Amino acid sequence: MTTLVIVLAVAVLVAAGVFFVIGRRNGKHGLRRRFGPEYDRVVARHDGDTRAAEHELNERLKRHGSLEERTLTPQEREEYLARWARVQDRFVDAPQQAVAEADALLAELARDLGFPDGTDFGEQADALSVHHAHHVHAYRRVHAARRGEGGTEELRTALVEARGLFDVLVSNGTGRPAHRDEHHAEGRGRA
């Protein structure tokens, strides 16, 4: 009888251990899948320490995971589209200023959608990473470019990448593309 109890206890412990290992492995893959390039960025920032990186990402999920994005009204959406078009138009004559305006516009749009207000760039970027992980690198890049990091080509690339985040945010789940008139935008040689 005691042998049976010992065998059952060992079996339960082994099953619990397997469950724990599989759960941790799936959690890691779940974070990697959810955060995409942001996962790799955070691991690199922690010098390859995946435990520290995963702890940080889990903390972000706790802080910002329940955030619900507010839907823009059609009028707000059109105003943001018009403002982004002006930013792109300005790029030809004043690339640094256009990138600074794009950075500020993204911060304002994110705030209007219910993300942290943007006074703390890191906090707003972290919140965006929870909901738009595959685009947040563009926000980080345009923010860095705003501070004068890089030449005209780097500024152009930052603005183009930021447009991807802008499109996702301004469409906020509508499924409608953010571009009003693709041929018109391409014909004007925008960034």
Image (tube, rainbow, N blue to C red):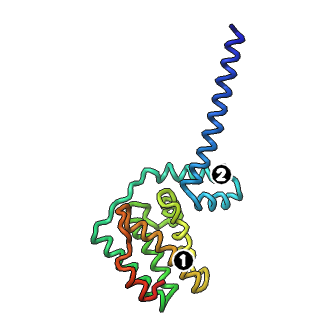
Q: Is residue 72 above or below residue 33?
A: below
Report the residue at 37% width, 63% height from top: 175
Question: In the image, what residue occupies the spot 53% across and 75% down?
Answer: 142
Q: Amino acid at mark 2?
A: Ala
Q: How many marks?
A: 2
Q: Secondary structure at mark 2?
A: helix
Viewer-nearest of discs 2 and 1: 1
- Which of 76 and 124 lies nearest the eye of the viewer? 76
Q: Nearer the viewer, residue 181 or 129?
A: 181
How far apart marks 2 and 1 lie (CA) works out to: 29 Å
* In this rendering, position of residue 14 left or right of residue 67: right
Which residue position is annotated with label 2? 52
Residue 15 percent coordinates (x, y) = 64, 28
Q: Compare marks 2 and 1 and give the one earlier in the sequence.
A: 2
40 shown above or below 154: above
Residue designated by label 1: 158
- Quadrant into which the N terminus falls: top right
Residue at the extreme front: 183
Q: Where is residue 102 drawn, in percent x and y?
A: 46, 77
